[in-house]
Amino acid sequence: MSWQDGIALLLAASLLWLVFRSLFWQQRGSQQVPLKGKFKAAREWLESNGYQVLRVRERAEWAGYYDGRKFQKTFIADFIVRQGTHSYVVKIVNEREKGINGVKLRDQWYPLVVAFGVNGILHIDVDAEQVHVIDFELKQPGYARRKRWVQHGVWMVVGILMGFVLSHGR
């Protein structure tokens, strides 16, 4: 076995380790917020129903610019959880919330899915003992889908070529 083969094996093992780690290892935030009342009840419900709590009180920040003006917003997820291959933002119902409508879905919930890169939202009402799943479906135009497939195809070809170069290079 040559040294190039050893490097190729080392790179492949490192890549597999990173993929395994990102899929199956629980990640904990560096700062844990103490759970009180509704938070504690929600966490207990999540864990007893098979959800793995990845993060507590996670924040994401958004900034938009219009010419020289800056607009920003902070998004806060009560929990980030995973069940199987799906991950969710968990928001606990508070007293100020008065039902759901299209504006709330568009302006409050959809940005959470995008900001945290999850599959959906679990909206937990601890007092009423209800859990609502909020999910979104985005139908992109044909050119956007084709562009994404071309990009994925290019990366796949580059990966295959890199594999050939590493396995046959001398």
Image (spheres, rainbow, N blue to C red):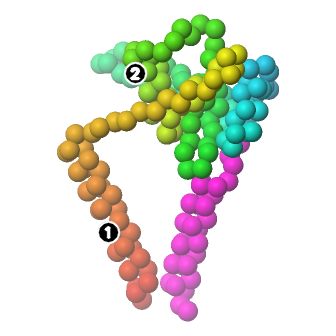
Q: Is residue 3 above or below residue 10?
A: below
Q: Residue furthest bottom?
A: 1
**Residue found at x 50% / y 35%:** 120
Which residue is labeled 1 in the image?
157
The residue stretch that appears in magenta: 1-28
Q: CA distance from mark 2 to mark 1?
A: 37 Å
- Quadrant where the N terminus sits is bottom right
* Secondary structure type for disc 2: helix
Q: Can residue 110 be seen?
A: yes
> Is 153 included in the stretch rendered in magenta?
no
Q: Earlier in the sequence, mark 2 or mark 1?
A: 2
Left or right, residue 79 beside residue 157: right
Q: Amino acid at mark 1?
A: Val
> Is 26 included in the stretch rendered in magenta?
yes
Which residue is labeled 2 in the image?
106
Q: Amino acid at mark 2?
A: Arg
State the residue in front, 36 or 27.
36
Question: Quarter-wise, where is residue 142 in the image?
Answer: top left
Counting from the top left corner in percent of width and height, residue 119 is at 49, 39
State the residue in front, 55 or 40.
40
* Secondary structure type for disc 1: helix
Counting from the top left corner in percent of width and height, residue 37 is at 78, 19
Left or right, residue 148 beside residue 17: left
